[in-house]
Amino acid sequence: MTTIFEGLGDLRKAMADHKREIQTKTVRRMVASGGAVLRKESKTIARKLGLEKTGSLIRNIAIKRERKTPPGVTQYNLGVRHGRDLGKRHTKFLALSKSGRVVTKRVNDPFYWRFHEFGTKYIQANEFIQQSLKNKRTEAIAAMSAKLKQEIDKANRTVK
């Protein structure tokens, strides 16, 4: 049985019938599915712009759930993992900076992604993240809607 929603009232009613844990998981999965559409488009645009010199920038385009949000809000950020966010999978090494300090650097760290996205005095902006939102906004919303219907149908089957 497929669920059909006529508006926000129907959606609120369907969500109110389920436990808080199921609501949270459903909303997170729904928002992540929309983010996945945008992530895929960002990678495609970055390849078209020729930003694939080492592949590091494109491999590290990711969505990440924001943990510190107000109650009732689910937020995912689309961006490029860099620096400390790369985690343990990237090799760290010590280097000497121009000022003589010892600094930690990471192999294949795409720290330069914001130069391409936002531009600098010398580099023209090649927006790949913002452009993906412009290109795939409706597809992301459709993916979120489809995921929501799928999750509510799944929850209804487990309750009965």
Image: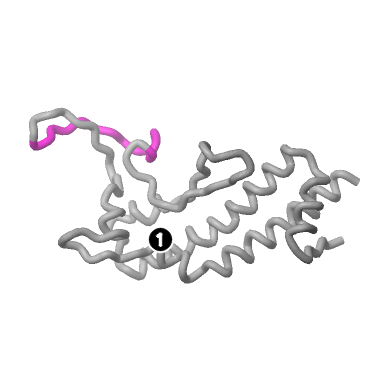
Percent position of residue 50, x then y: 30, 67
| Residue drawn at 60 percent across, 56 percent down | 33
Q: Residue at x 38, y 56 (%)?
A: 58
Task: Using residue 160 as the reference point, say whether residue 42 is left or right of it.
Answer: left
Q: Give the colouring mode of the picture.
A: one colour
Q: In the rendered image, which residue does mark 1 sit on?
A: 129
Give percent across and percent down for residue 12. 76, 52
Would you place residue 57 above or below residue 17 in this image? below
Say which residue appears at 72% left-offset and 44% top-offset. Answer: 23
Residue lying furthest top: 102
- As for residue 52 lying within the magenta part, the answer is no
| Residue visible at 91% across and 46% down in the picture | 160
Residue 124: x, y in percent?
Answer: 23, 66
SS assignment at label 1: helix
- Marker count (numbered): 1
Identified by mark 1, the residue type is: Ile
Q: Which residues are magenta?
A: 85-98
**Image quadrant where one finds the N terminus:** bottom right
User: Against 29, is 102 above or below?
Assistant: above
Picture coordinates of residue 13, whole percent (x, y): 81, 52
The image quarter containing residue 43 is bottom left
Residue sitting at the far left: 99
As drawn, is 79 to the left or to the right of 67? left
Q: Residues within 10 Å of mark 1 (few under 14, many from 20)?
A: many
Q: Tell me if residue 94 is in the magenta stretch.
A: yes
